[in-house]
Amino acid sequence: MFRALPIISLVTLLSACNLYVVDSSAPALTASQMTKSADSTEAAVPPPPPPPPPPPPPPKPVAGSEQIAFMDKTTAHLEGCRFLSMMRLTHRGNFEDGLILLRNGAYAINANMMVPVRLVEMADPISGLHYYHVRLMRCPMQNLSAEN
């Protein structure tokens, strides 16, 4: 019993009610002062936020990047393509503009095929945040058919 007494007193001390001290020397507000303070807070409305910046201009395709096409993973392995890199891109704007950026990046590292891992087009195609995840492949040109 005597060992439980310090624990009980500690719990009681730590869970006690808060004690508020009210300064009684401060004068109480009158009704007219309260309405003035309420009117001043209503009048202090913050200004509207500035308009969003204009969208950036659409990207320009690099010469030669328009020949980079999509291919499935099985066909890429059967055609003798080799894996170069993975590319992830998030783009806010038009979905096709994101594809142009994706092709420009693939062209910069000398890939000629892309294998889509995940392409996510948001519900708002104009200003939604789109997600692109592709595998970049380099395929021998003699094995590529004209329809790719």
Image (cartoon, helix red, strand yellow):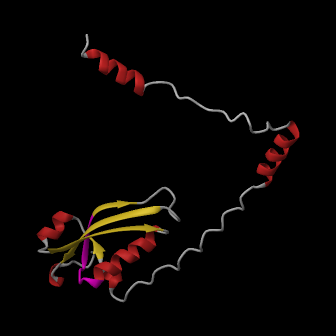
Indicate left or right for 3 with 18 as reference: left
Percent from the top left, x then y, of residue 92? 47, 67
Indicate left or right for 2 with 130 as reference: left
Indicate left or right for 47 with 100 as reference: right
Residue located 78% across and 49% down the image: 42
Percent from the top left, x then y, of residue 10? 35, 24
* Residue 98 vertical placement versus 49 (above, below): below
* Residue 36 vertical placement versus 76 (above, below): above
Assign the C terminus to one quadrant of the image.
Answer: bottom left
Assign the N terminus to one quadrant of the image.
Answer: top left
Residue farthest top in this picture: 1
Q: Is residue 64 magenta?
A: no
Residue located 52% across and 59% down the image: 124
As rendered, which of 91 and 145 lies closer to the eye?
91
Q: Residue 25 occupies which quadrant of the picture?
A: top right
Q: How many numbered discs sit on the rendered protein? A: 0
Residue located 80% across and 51% down the image: 40
Residue located 53% across and 29% down the image: 18
Q: Is residue 113 magenta?
A: yes
Q: Residue 31 occupies which quadrant of the picture?
A: top right
As rendered, which of 22 and 38 lies closer to the eye?
22
* Residue 100 vertical placement versus 14 (above, below): below
Task: Read off the magenta span.
Answer: 108-116
Indicate left or right for 46 with 119 as reference: right
Residue farthest right in this picture: 32
Percent from the top left, x then y, of residue 35? 84, 42
Residue farthest bottom in this picture: 63
Percent from the top left, x then y, of residue 110? 23, 84
